[in-house]
Image: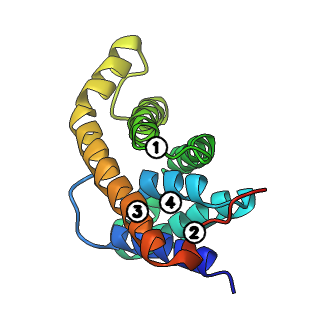
Amino acid sequence: MNKRLITLSAIIGLAALSRLLPHPPNVTPIAAIGLFAGAQFRNRKAAFLLPMAAMFLSDLVLGFAVYGGALLKSQPPVYLCVLMTVAIGRLIRNNRSALKIASATFGNAVIFYLVTNFAVWAWGALYPRTWSGLIVCYTAAIPFFRNSLIGDITFVAVLFGGFAVLERFFASLREPLLA
């Protein structure tokens, strides 16, 4: 068995399970999971499939046990953002410097804010479908953006930093160098 693959999968699974714990609104590991998977998995299919599976399974629990079916109906823009986050992680895969990881984290938080709040405005009933309604929607979401950014920074630091520590102590977790 590939110890690296198993460890990365377990880390992503544990991060996804943390969504089930009480937390402030929008302080979740969703973006960090996607960025981490995109940057760490050599196999492109695994990089995309594992975060989507983790999201789907934790959404099933949250949808049925906590929020009801409405959660599942509102998730397509979130899943789109997860896919984009994995793609961003793939872009930094071969050069995972702290600056690139931080830039990807911030850029992803902005993308998530723009996409999901546009969806709230476009498909929801809270805001009029006018330019002013869109501005009000984005303005009302600023506290959630702050929470998302705090959560993203925290979980990215834990996932990337924690795995870097594991790689340092366990050579079997290090990615083999390509010839």
Residue 44 is at least partly visible in this image:
yes
What residue appears at the point 54 percent right and 71 percent down from the top-left corner?
8
Q: Are marks 3 and 2 in contact (CB under 8 Å)?
A: no
Residue corresponding to mark 3 = 159
Residue corresponding to mark 4 = 72
The numbered mark at residue 174 is 2
What residue appears at the point 43 percent right and 54 percent down from the top-left corner?
32
Separation of disc 2 and disc 4 at Cα? 37 Å
Compared with residue 111, is residue 27 higher up or lower down, i.e. above or below? below
Residue 26 in the image: x percent, y percent?
A: 30, 51
Q: Are marks 2 and 4 in contact (CB under 8 Å)?
A: no
Helix, strand or loop at disc 1? loop
The numbered mark at residue 89 is none
Label located before the other in sequence (4 or 3): 4
Residue 134 in the image: x percent, y percent?
A: 38, 21
Q: Is residue 60 left or right of residue 27?
A: right
Label located before the other in sequence (3 or 1): 1
Label located before the other in sequence (4 or 1): 4
Helix, strand or loop at disc 3? helix
Helix, strand or loop at disc 2? loop
Label located before the other in sequence (2 or 4): 4
Q: Nearer the viewer, mark 3 or mark 2?
A: 2
Compared with residue 83, is residue 145 higher up or lower down, i.e. above or below? above
Residue corresponding to mark 1 = 97
Separation of disc 4 and disc 3 at Cα? 26 Å
Q: Nearer the viewer, mark 2 or mark 4?
A: 2
Separation of disc 1 and disc 2 at Cα? 16 Å
Question: What amino acid is found at the position of numbered circle 2 in the picture?
Answer: Arg
Separation of disc 4 and disc 1 at Cα? 35 Å
What residue appears at the point 38 percent right and 40 percent down from the top-left corner?
102
Label located before the other in sequence (1 or 2): 1
Helix, strand or loop at disc 4? helix
